[in-house]
Image: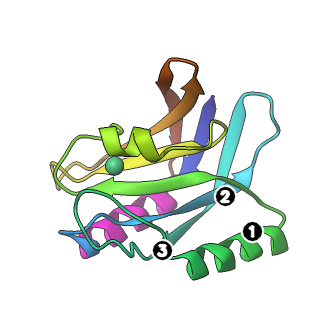
Amino acid sequence: MRITIKRSDVDEMIRHALSERPDEACGLIAGRDPEDGTRVIEKVYLLTNTDHTNEHFSIDPKEQLKAVKDMRANGMVPLGNWHSHPETPSRPSEEDIRLANDSRASYLILSLENEDAPVLNAFCIEKKEDGKSVRKEELIVLEG
Ligand SMILES: [Zn+2]
């Protein structure tokens, strides 16, 4: 999977994630999925983590519903979600892997471990017969 995201959207995620510390920040991503191995993120939703901890997140269900309605109204499809790791690297935790239940979703994780150099990676978490497999996806940030 080759995913593109705009620099301005990445910057918004970073701003939101920094302001939510010490809790994890979270939200949804939406855009275009031509189903040819590429995805274009056109909008990033900054939503409330109702867990309010630095170890996991739950997206506020009302906000989630509103976001999905907004996606439909704007001709976008849901592509997955994003969340921050305030103190740990940009890769899925055991808990993230356990809770991931959509093999088609892209999971974006923004690490603030080094707050001067946040790291954003995308993952695909697939259910297999013998557990789950985690694959890093190609993420391209469009500058300008
Ligand atoms: Zn996580």
- Tell me where the magenta segment starts and ends, as one range: 8-19
Mark 3 or mark 2, whichever is nearer to me: 3
Task: Left or right? Give the position of 19 relative to 50.
Answer: left
Q: Which mark is residue 30?
A: 2
Q: How is the image coloured?
A: rainbow
Q: Decide which of tag 1 and tag 2 comes sooner along the chain.
A: 2
Tell me where residue 90 appears, x and y as whole percent.
Answer: 30, 41
Task: Left or right? Give the position of 11 relative to 114.
Answer: right
Q: Amino acid at mark 2?
A: Ala
Q: Amino acid at mark 1?
A: Met
In the orientation shown, which residue stands out farthest toward the top?
Answer: 130
Residues at circles 1 and 2 in contact by the CB criterion of under 8 Å: yes
Ligand 1 closer than 8 Å to label 3 CB: no
15 drawn magenta: yes
Q: Decide which of tag 3 and tag 1 comes sooner along the chain.
A: 3
Q: Residue at x 82, y 39 (%)?
A: 34
Name the secondary structure under disc 1.
helix
Q: Amino acid at mark 3?
A: Leu
| Helix, strand or loop: magenta stretch | helix
The residue that disc 1 covers is: 71
